[in-house]
Image (tube, rainbow, N blue to C red):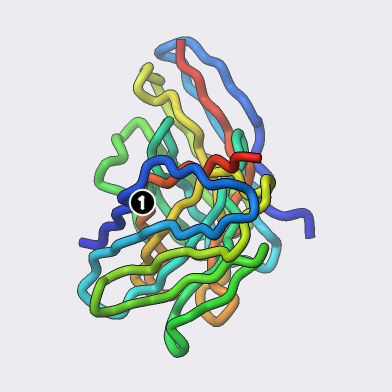
Amino acid sequence: AQSVTQPDIHITVSEGASLELRCNYSYGATPYLFWYVQSPGQGLQLLLKYFSGDTLVQGIKGFEAEFKRSQSSFNLRKPSVHWSDAAEYFCAVGRGTNAGKSTFGDGTTLTVKP
Amino acid sequence: DTGVSQDPRHKITKRGQNVTFRCDPISEHNRLYWYRQTLGQGPEFLTYFQNEAQLEKSRLLSDRFSAERPKGSFSTLEIQRTEQGDSAMYLCASSLAAGEDYGYTFGSGTRLTVV
């Protein structure tokens, strides 16, 4: 069975500081990995995804993530955080484009200090 | 393209009543998914369709839950005899079945409160 662990429930960073959100996954084959962002009371928005190839993927809003197979990780990074980045972030793993279902972690809430 | 639409945004119902939610996906997306999200948790998979066929249903989903996508376009999720434990945000998402553009587009959700 596939699973996702986001070790940090809540992270606080200062505006302009760098950010790294951790994600560890468990899956027996090559995973399809995603990061989504959710603002309060809203649905989730896809930030970026990894299917294959280059292990460093770029997404929207200046985010990037690095796939490390040896560590079963897919950490999300941003070099300089903006106040508007405050939200909840979810990592997800899928069985592949033809299998449909994704499994989500429980999320990391990001607070940005002025 | 107006994105994924869900209706209603909020629903308050009395325990034991039936409720139905609607989801209109992005028109060219042939996959449609239902997830449930409770406070402090990530979305939990309920079921998904490819066109009108329901391809997978979570084993966690009780028989009180049923979903349809009759013409391969919009979908409905019905909960019969609601219980307080059904209170949650119900999220709909759609996607293409495969390819480089694969990834969910979520609606804003329907928040259900069972009193």
In this rendered view, identify the residue nearer to me: A40 or A66: A66
Question: Looking at the image, which residue is at 43% across and 57% down?
Answer: A21
Q: Position of residue B16 (x, y in %)?
A: 40, 13
Question: Looking at the image, which residue is at 46% across and 65% down?
Answer: A34
Question: Looking at the image, which residue is at 68% across and 47% down?
Answer: A84
Q: Position of residue B78 (x, y in %)?
A: 48, 33
| Residue located farthest toward the right when viewing the structure as drawn | B1
Question: Looking at the image, which residue is at 54% across and 81% down?
Answer: B99
Q: Position of residue A109 (x, y in %)?
A: 48, 42
In this rendered view, identify the residue nearer to me: B33 or A42: A42
Amino acid tagged 1? Gly
In this rendered view, identify the residue nearer to me: A92 or B93: A92
Residue indicated by mark 1: A105
Q: Is residue B57 left or right of residue A70?
A: right
Q: Is residue B53 above or below residue B113?
A: below
Q: Position of residue B11 (x, y in %)?
A: 58, 22
Q: Is residue A98 above or below residue B55?
A: below
* Label 1: element kind: loop
